[in-house]
């Protein structure tokens, strides 16, 4: 969490607690009565949102209805009940999680605001109709209005953050093609930066001075960095620092541009060299990250990188919902992998991972997706596949892994098994639910003895 996020969260938490502390007993009772009618509020919310063509796309699914209906009631109960000081973390956490879910399912933020407005106006009506004195009613309305706004503020911040992250990932996926050959480009830019540095040092060493020297921004490297590097590397911290360092070098140069004064030049020489050394270091990091992104592949196994799970699954969810084509998520984990590392060394462990990756690539269809999800964990997306087909494909895969023996030398061979959890996409727009279901099934496969497949309920 960034410093800004943390301070925003603590501001909201303290506002919320101040409101809660000021809520009198009669106000709390009035809010309890409303919370007890959360069922009615949720029903009204649905009726209202289903009337909206844009909103109804997100709500018509049966899964959404049954899950969201109860989740909405639980949420209303929570926000209408004033929190105690120790509960604020849980209150805020709930709003953040909801914001993340909204981001994953790509629900437009205006729909969330519209739903909240509807809930608010129904709560106000209920409070107006309740047998309350004027003061309690007013305070109740003020309390409900403020807490709903606070909850929405936390949700929106999380939403924006999650959307920004996934947009960056999508963008990186698209833009890494801007640099066609990462290895060659890395060498070329390293050399261009070095050329500029050599020219700078040469001028100082020979007493030529800096008049007429190309600024670092205007140099071959600087121009490449601005036009190609920045969009390809994405808007990360390392890019901002590199930009600041380039500007700093140019400021030092322009201050001393006309000087042949040795004292000034020898003063800036170590500063510029220091900046350039930092730029080289950052550039190496940025290229390293780009290499990992290359074709979105994990460098050890050449499987898809985990960071693109969201990009791919959002797309598959849309396809599955449009065409009513199911897909299946499988979580696979190599059994007792730690003992392979411990007994034969990390290098042998890496060989096993590469072997398993090639078995996966041979066993699944080219349209399926295979991600390296964790150290020895893989996430498979079997597209246009129902539970029955998935079970037979994965049973074949399980048997194939079991037959694999990895021979290192005459007296060193490893036999392998893996465990699997299968979950059929259930139509809910949040793909994370299906990943979690497959993960739970995998956990069951592990506790039930390993080298087996479990299907999510
Ligand atoms: N060689 C190698 N090992 C890795 C890599 N990534 C993670 N690991 C190791 O994988 C091991 C995973 O161990 P555990 O999570 O205990 O799982 P396990 O031994 O497979 O046991 P179960 O999953 O319960 O059957 C850890 O020791 C990690 O250090 C990698 O890239 N290469």
Image (cartoon, rainbow, N blue to C red):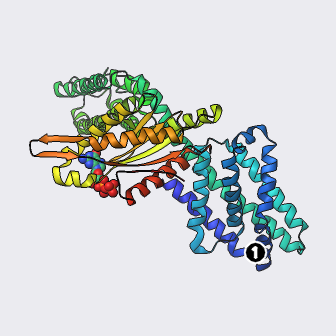
In the image, is residue 289 above or below residue 67? above
Outermost residue toward the bottom? Answer: 25
Q: Which residue is mark 1?
A: 28
Label 1 SS = helix
Relative horizontal placement of residue 266, taking residue 424 as reference (left or right): left
Relative horizontal placement of residue 12, taking residue 213 as reference (left or right): right
Return the x and y of residue 54 as percentages of the image width and height. 74, 38
In the image, is residue 37 above or below residue 97? below
Q: Is residue 286 visible?
A: no
Q: Nearer the viewer, residue 321 or 409?
A: 409
Q: Is residue 415 visible?
A: yes
Return the x and y of residue 46 as percentages of the image width and height. 78, 50
Return the x and y of residue 397 as percentages of the image width and height. 37, 40
Q: Nearer the viewer, residue 269 or 207?
A: 269
Relative horizontal placement of residue 127, taking residue 377 as reference (left or right): right
- The quadrant in which residue 123 appears is bottom right
Q: Nearer the viewer, residue 442 or 250?
A: 442
Q: Nearer the viewer, residue 328 or 317?
A: 328
- The quadrant in which residue 266 appears is top left
Relative horizontal placement of residue 329, taking residue 354 as reference (left or right): right
In the image, is residue 209 above or below residue 120? above
Outermost residue toward the left? Answer: 410
Mark 1 neighbour class, 10 Å CA radius: few under 14, some 14 to 19, many 20 or more:
some
- The quadrant in which residue 380 appears is top left
Q: Residue at x 61, y 53 (%)?
A: 98
């Amino acid at each position: 969490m960034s410093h800004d996020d943390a301070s925003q969260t603590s501001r909201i938490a303290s506002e919320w607690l101040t409101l809660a502390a000021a809520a009198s007993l009669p106000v709390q009772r009035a809010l309890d009565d409303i919370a007890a009618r959360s069922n009615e509020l949720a029903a009204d919310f649905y009726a209202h949102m289903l009337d909206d063509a844009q909103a109804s796309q997100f709500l018509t699914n049966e899964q959404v209805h049954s899950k969201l209906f109860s989740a909405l009631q639980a949420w209303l109960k929570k926000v209408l009940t004033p929190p105690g000081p120790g509960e604020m973390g849980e209150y805020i956490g709930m709003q953040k999680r909801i914001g993340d879910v909204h981001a994953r399912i790509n629900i437009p933020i205006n729909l969330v605001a519209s739903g909240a407005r509807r809930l608010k106006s129904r709560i106000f009506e209920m409070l107006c109709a309740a047998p309350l004195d004027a003061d309690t009613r007013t305070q109740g309305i003020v309390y409900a209005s403020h807490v709903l706004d606070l909850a929405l503020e936390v949700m929106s911040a999380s939403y924006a953050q999650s959307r920004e992250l996934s947009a960056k990932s999508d963008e990186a996926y698209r833009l890494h093609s801007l640099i066609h050959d990462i290895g060659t480009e890395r060498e070329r830019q390293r050399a261009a930066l070095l050329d500029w540095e050599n020219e700078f040092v040469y001028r100082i060493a020979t007493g030529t001075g800096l008049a007429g020297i190309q600024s670092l921004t205007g140099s071959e490297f600087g121009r490449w960095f601005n036009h190609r590097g920045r969009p390809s590397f994405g808007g990360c911290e390392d890019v901002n620092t590199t930009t600041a360092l380039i500007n700093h070098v140019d400021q030092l140069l322009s201050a001393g541009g006309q000087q042949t004064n040795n004292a000034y030049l020898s003063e800036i020489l170590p500063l510029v060299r220091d900046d350039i050394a930092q730029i080289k270091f950052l550039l190496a990091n940025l290229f390293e990250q780009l290499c990992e992104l290359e074709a979105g592949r994990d460098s050890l196994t050449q499987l898809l990188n985990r960071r693109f799970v969201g990009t791919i699954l959002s797309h598959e969810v849309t396809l599955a919902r449009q065409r009513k084509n199911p897909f299946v998520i499988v979580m696979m984990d190599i059994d007792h992998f730690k003992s392979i590392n411990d007994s034969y060394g990390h290098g042998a462990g890496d060989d096993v991972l590469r072997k398993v990756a090639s078995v996966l690539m041979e066993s699944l269809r080219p349209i399926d997706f295979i991600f390296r999800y964790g150290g020895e964990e893989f996430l498979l997306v079997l597209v246009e596949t129902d539970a029955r087909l998935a079970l037979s494909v994965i049973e074949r895969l399980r048997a194939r892994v079991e037959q694999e023996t990895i021979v290192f030398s005459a007296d060193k061979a490893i036999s392998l098994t893996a465990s699997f959890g299968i979950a059929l996409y259930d139509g809910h727009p949040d793909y994370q639910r299906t990943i979690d279901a497959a993960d739970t099934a995998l956990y069951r496969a592990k506790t039930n003895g390993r080298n087996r497949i479990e299907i999510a309920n």
